[in-house]
């Protein structure tokens, strides 16, 4: 459960510098020629220099595109490919820009410019981008920020600065900036949904903590009812009433069927690929057999969700024919070789770093890499040759790994199966596709998994298998169904083989003394352990008092809870006691999986951490020149911090979008009765999770009933002062839906159930006088 789940600041050497060139021309007598007047002509049969190309574009307005330039400089034959590469390089660096098929010089920065330094920039090698830029001029130029040892103004990552710009000359000129002043960055615009009413218009804020505001009709701009907009807030009148003015229309989530747009913009998730990134992806060539082992005859197969569009891992298993390893298995895991296409310092790499990971919403995916890479070149499609990194693991009969080796290969997937297909075949319901695969491929895979699961049980990872709901949308982007997908043995097989491959990657890189990014998960803090002990004590569940715990200790707690019939309550608290997994250049193990070393290797299509591990393996094992660079290796702590943050951002965005979709779905059922469980207890009230949909909502403490309720933290309960009526984490309750706010993703319930009888909170004096009834009409009064 715990593991189911930018442009680069790598430094000067990895950064592409963006150029502004000062042009000089010679005065020459006019000649009858169709070409531009250039100060220096390339010799016949030679490519022009970068400066000559730029000079031609600057002087001759008749040059509209690549063909015109090729004609001017006499490009033909074998010169075409390097000439095209030179143009692509200049465009990628921001020196020239393309409007449809026309090429032109990019606009230059003024001598004094306001610059924004990215928050993930390297503090020792700062770079920045202009705060204002016309998108028609191409991508923003990158500027190197120079901070001397005696500088009066020393900016930091995330700052906005006023700077003096120098556009240097030379073979490779570039923009540099000397900071003059650190400026206050304007507050990020507030966003919300426009709602028209009888009085005009109002803004429904996305942030639950913000209040609605009126929008004067003259300040609506081009927005319409239901549009997601950015606004600026201004105060009006003597009472300084806040009013909103629309500054930007983002889109209409209802008409476009993309509720995820709200989270994408609210959390500033990059979702549109720059032109240079798309171009690099489109121009990428398929990897060949050069420098690779030919494994195209090995019948590796992919097993994925039925609706998967990319397939980045494939598996194969066979009995070990070594007589010294009787009953053993050889398991092979092949992973798409993304490192072959996404090289350090390229536009593709910078954008992948910026995003950090793919973000999965019910209505869309915001991918880390363009489709040309993720769904084509790096998708292990059935019957097509694909580049991959593979690990071959030899296991004994008990599932213990004896040895492993990594290989850079060219493979061909023998079959694409869904989890349901593979499981059905093993269960005796093979179809036309899985029937021929059952004996030679599927049964050996399951035999290896049986051994691996034995080793897993012996290792004792945290067995916290909470249900995960999947929201099914209709063709309009609205919720059609909510399901809890069945957890099949086929899912566990793939998970176990991926975990084994990840462990092998970490072990190999440690043996080679290579830098790498670990996936780490710290043990619970002593404070969280004590809170868990207090809670379990109230349920008469025993737990050892030592602060030194293992994942298996929690499994013992969960087994006690299953026997006592309160596993939902205990599972929730055990989950809350856990630290959050993250990426780190330093290893402190993975508590939840009970592993000493662990690295993410198996999904470089959607996680930047895995791409770093692939590059580290390529470098450490001498697989090619596209491995981890020295600059990347020196920046791994910063990379780990950045991608851990993007992962948390993605999780928050996915959760917020699910909340909004469910609130939208339930808004049609105001007044309906639901069954749920108490999923959280705070001083201000109870959080409720509905059993039917998994939607979360809130019951304010003031509406609980006939008593004054105290929050008893160690029991995770609200307890009545006089009656001792108690509502505890995990309690099953009946509630009525009172209010739904789809934009905020918020639901409010009223409680219909009685609490359990108990004792009033100890050490508290009951309030005098009759208790005020805040209870809903559906509650029984005593």
Image: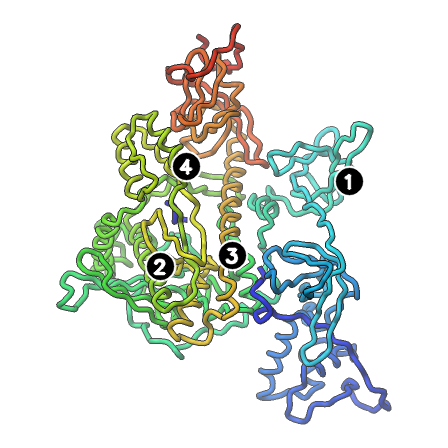
Q: Classify mark 3: residues with Cα within 10 Å, few (<14), some (14-19) or many (20+).
A: many
Query: Which of pointers 3 and 4 lies earlier in the amino acid sequence?
Result: 3
Q: Is residue 269 left or right of residue 398?
A: right
Residue tagged by mark 2? 502
Between 90 and 454, which is closer to the camera in this rendering?
A: 454
Q: Nearer the viewer, mark 2 or mark 4?
A: 4
Residue 674 numbered mark, or none: none
Q: Are marks 3 and 1 in contact (CB under 8 Å)?
A: no
Mark 3 and mark 2 lie on one chain; the one further toward the N terminus is: 3
Q: Indicate which disc, 2 or 4, sits on the residue closer to the N terminus.
A: 2
* Image quarter hosting the C terminus: top left
Residue found at x 48% / y 24%: 672
The residue positioned farthest toward the bottom in the image shown? 44
Q: Are marks 3 and 4 in contact (CB under 8 Å)?
A: no
> Which residue in the protein does label 1 denote?
219
Return the residue at label 3: 356
- Asked whether the beta carbons under mark 3 and mark 2 sit within 8 Å of each other, the answer is no
Q: Which residue is mark 4?
A: 528
Is residue 203 shown left or right of residue 238?
A: left
Residue at coordinates 36% horizontally, 63% vertically from top-left? 505
State the image coordinates of residue 711 (x, y, percent, origin top left).
Answer: 47, 23
Instruction: Farthest residue to the front: give it.
Output: 150
Is 658 located above or below residue 709 in the figure?
below
**Residue 200 in which image quadrant:** top right
**Of the pair 709 and 446, the residue shown nearer to us:** 709
């Amino acid at each position: 459960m715990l593991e189911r789940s930018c442009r680069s600041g790598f430094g000067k050497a990895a950064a592409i510098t963006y150029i502004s060139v000062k042009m000089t021309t010679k005065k020459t007598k006019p000649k009858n020629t169709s070409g531009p007047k250039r100060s220096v002509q390339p010799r016949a049969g030679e490519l022009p220099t970068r400066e000559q190309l730029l000079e031609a574009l600057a002087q001759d307005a008749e040059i509209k595109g690549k063909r015109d330039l090729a004609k001017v400089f006499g490009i033909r034959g074998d010169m075409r490919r390097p000439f095209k590469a030179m143009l692509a390089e200049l465009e990628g660096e921001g020196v020239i820009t393309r409007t449809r098929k026309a090429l032109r010089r990019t606009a230059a920065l003024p001598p004094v410019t306001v610059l924004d330094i990215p928050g993930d920039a390297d503090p020792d090698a700062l770079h920045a981008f202009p705060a204002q830029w016309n998108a028609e001029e191409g991508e923003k130029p990158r500027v190197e920020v120079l901070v001397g040892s005696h500088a009066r103004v020393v900016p930091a990552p995330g700052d906005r600065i006023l700077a003096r710009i120098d556009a240097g000359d030379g073979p490779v000129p570039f923009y540099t900036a000397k900071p003059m002043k650190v400026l206050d960055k304007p507050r990020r615009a507030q966003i919300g949904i426009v709602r028209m009413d009888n009085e005009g218009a109002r803004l429904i804020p996305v942030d639950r903590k913000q209040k609605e505001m009126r929008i004067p009709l003259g300040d609506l701009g081009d927005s319409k009812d239901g549009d997601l907009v950015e606004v600026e807030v201004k105060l009006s009148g003597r009472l300084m009433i806040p009013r909103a003015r629309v500054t930007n229309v983002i889109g209409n989530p209802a008409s476009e069927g993309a509720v995820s747009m709200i989270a994408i913009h609210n959390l500033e998730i990059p979702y549109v690929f720059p032109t240079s990134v798309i171009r690099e992806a489109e121009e990428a060539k398929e990897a060949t057999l050069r420098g690779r082992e030919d494994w195209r005859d090995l019948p590796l197969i992919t097993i994925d969700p039925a609706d998967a569009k990319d397939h980045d891992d494939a598996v194969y298993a066979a009995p070990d024919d070594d007589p010294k390893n009787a009953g053993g298995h050889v398991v092979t895991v092949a992973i798409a070789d993304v490192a072959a296409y996404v090289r350090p310092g390229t536009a593709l790499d910078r954008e992948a770093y910026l995003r950090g990971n793919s973000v999965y919403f019910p209505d869309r995916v915001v991918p880390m890499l363009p489709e040309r890479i993720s769904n084509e070149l790096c998708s292990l499609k059935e019957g097509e040759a694909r580049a991959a990194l593979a690990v071959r693991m030899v296991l004994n009969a008990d599932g213990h790994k004896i040895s492993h080796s990594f290989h850079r290969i060219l493979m061909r997937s023998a079959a694409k199966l869904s989890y349901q297909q593979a499981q059905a075949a093993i269960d005796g319901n093979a179809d036309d596709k899985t029937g021929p695969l059952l004996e030679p491929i599927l049964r050996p895979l399951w035999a290896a998994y049986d051994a691996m699961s034995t080793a897993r049980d012996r290792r004792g990872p945290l067995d916290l298998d909470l249900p995960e709901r999947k929201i099914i949308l209709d063709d309009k982007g609205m919720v059609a169904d909510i399901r809890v997908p069945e957890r099949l043995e086929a899912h566990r097989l793939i998970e176990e083989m991926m975990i084994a491959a990840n462990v092998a990657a970490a072990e190999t890189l440690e043996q080679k003394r290579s830098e790498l990014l670990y996936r780490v998960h710290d043990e619970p803090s002593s404070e969280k352990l004590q809170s868990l002990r207090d809670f379990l004590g109230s349920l008469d569940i025993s737990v050892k008092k030592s602060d030194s715990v293992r994942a298996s200790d929690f499994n013992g707690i969960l087994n006690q809870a299953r026997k006592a019939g309160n596993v939902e309550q205990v599972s929730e608290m055990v989950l809350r006691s856990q630290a959050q997994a993250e990426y780190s250049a330093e290893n402190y193990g993975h508590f939840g999986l009970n592993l000493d070393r662990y690295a993410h290797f198996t999904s470089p299509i959607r996680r930047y951490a895995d791409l770093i591990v692939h590059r580290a393996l390529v470098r450490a094992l001498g697989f090619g020149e596209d491995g981890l660079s020295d600059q990347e290796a020196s920046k791994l702590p910063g990379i780990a911090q950045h991608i851990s943050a993007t992962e948390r951002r993605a999780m928050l965005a996915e959760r917020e979008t699910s909340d909004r979709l469910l609130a939208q779905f339930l808004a049609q059922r105001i007044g309906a009765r639901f069954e749920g469980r108490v999923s959280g207890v705070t001083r201000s009230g109870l959080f409720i999770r509905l059993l039917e949909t998994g939607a979360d909502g809130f019951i304010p403490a003031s509406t609980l009933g006939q008593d004054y309720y105290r929050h008893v933290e160690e029991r995770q309960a609200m307890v009545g002062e006089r009656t001792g009526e108690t509502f505890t984490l995990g309690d099953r309750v009946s509630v009525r839906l009172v209010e739904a706010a789809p934009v905020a993703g918020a639901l409010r319930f009223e409680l219909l159930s009685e609490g359990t009888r108990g004792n009033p909170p100890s050490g508290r004096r009951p309030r005098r006088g009759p208790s005020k009834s805040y209870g809903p009409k559906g509650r029984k009064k005593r």
